[in-house]
Amino acid sequence: MGTECGQELDDCGTTFDALRERWLRQGGDRDVAVSSIEAAGAANLLERKVTAPWGGPELSLFQQILRVIAHLAQHKGQLFYYLKLMGRDVNTGDLWGG
């Protein structure tokens, strides 16, 4: 099945701060996303039609990127509620960046 971890990240051999530090050291996902979009160029974003690797309709690259962003927002919400259920000190400012 997999390794059973307790409610705290420390129980799995890591901490939130360690994960955050590693993510920041790697430049974060934002930098990679922005450079990839810039490399694609405006014409490709609007005119190139692609199908997502997991299936679905053929849409412009721009539309597919918007769908990925919406999908990631769902996961962000899930993580927020898991943390709340675990008793972590998070609030809507953490969820929405306020």
Image (cartoon, helix red, strand yellow):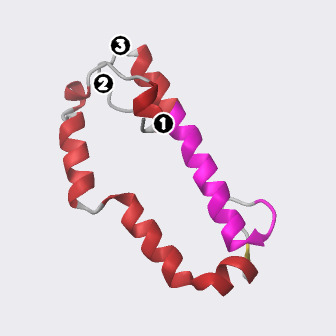
Dot 1: element: helix
Q: Position of residue 16 (x, y in %)?
A: 24, 35
Considering every residue shown, the one lying at the far front of the view is 98
Residue for point 72% across, 78% down: 46
Whether residues under marks 1 and 2 lie with C-beta atoms below 8 angstroms apart, the answer is: no
Q: Which residue is mark 2?
A: 5
Res 96 label? 1
Q: Position of residue 80 (x, y in %)?
A: 45, 28
Quarter of the image containing the N terminus? top left
Res 87 label? 3
Residue for point 52% across, 31% down: 78
Mark 3 neighbour class, 10 Å CA radius: few under 14, some 14 to 19, many 20 or more: few
**Residue 14 located left or right of residue 53:** left
Amino acid type of disc 3? Gly
Say which of 1 and 90 sits in front.
Answer: 90
Question: Bounds of the magenta span?
Answer: 56-77
